[in-house]
Amino acid sequence: MERTLVFLKPDSIQRRLAGRIIAQFEDKGLNIIAMKLMRVSPDLARRHYAEHIKKDWYQELETFITGGPIVAMILEGPEAIRVVREMVGATNGLTAVPGSIRGQFSSSRQMNLVHASDGPDSALREIGIFFDTEEIHSYEPTIRPWLRAPTEE
């Protein structure tokens, strides 16, 4: 099982898309093992986006991500990082594949609704930024036998 951090950005919340997006992850069979509604402070934004702070567009990104509440969550499942990234789609909503979350709902590069960790190292780092260990609740769903064959992890 693999874990990834996902958060629904302020545009998702303002546009009332949170439930529809979360349902897609659940429909795929991913477990939500932690979730909270929160505000991203400027300090948290700088910690999360540390590699972008020196870029010309960083201040605009910080203003956007701190501009309203987000829903942060940890999703768990086989190949969760790859699966979620494919479900979310390309960063730019205009080029995202139809059927992906961004392909369905976004027409912007910055206001692209969802953040998803891009690899195992970033997932581990980002989960640690947004969640304390006691907030994470892994579980085996009772419908597990109907989601994957017994030999599949």
Image (cartoon, rainbow, N blue to C red):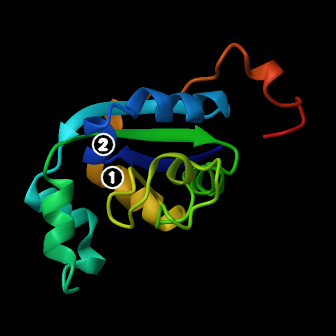
Q: Residue furthest left?
A: 42
Task: Please tell me whether residue 61 is drawn above or below residue 24 in the rendered image.
Answer: below
Task: Please tell me whether residue 145 is drawn above or below residue 26 in the rendered image.
Answer: above
Name the amino acid, label 1.
Answer: Gly
Q: Quadrant of the C terminus?
A: top right
Name the spot of residue 16 as percent of width and height, x first: 33, 31
- Is disc 2 in contact with disc 1, using a CB cutoff of under 8 Å? yes
Q: Residue furthest top?
A: 142
**What element does badge 2 sit on?**
loop
Q: Residue at point 13% right, 73% down?
A: 59
Q: Residues within 10 Å of mark 1 (few under 14, many from 20)?
A: few
Q: Residue at point 44% right, 65% down?
A: 122
Total numbered circles: 2
Name the spot of residue 138 as percent of width and height, x first: 52, 29
Q: Quadrant of the N terminus?
A: top right
Horizontally, residue 3 falls left or right of residue 124, namely right
The part of the image, by quadrant, that contains residue 61 is bottom left
Name the amino acid, label 2.
Answer: Phe
The part of the image, by quadrant, that contains residue 65 is bottom left
Name the spot of residue 97 as percent of width and height, x first: 64, 59
Q: Mark 1 highlights which residue? A: 128
Mark on residue 131? 2
Q: Residue at point 88% right, 29% down?
A: 150
Q: CA distance from mark 2 to mark 1?
A: 5 Å
**What element does badge 1 sit on?**
helix
Name the spot of residue 39 as percent of width and height, x first: 15, 42
Horizontally, residue 73 falls left or right of residue 65, namely right
Task: Please tell me whether residue 136 is drawn above or below residue 49 in the rendered image.
Answer: above
Q: Nearer the viewer, residue 22 or 36?
A: 22
Q: Nearer the viewer, residue 6 or 13?
A: 13
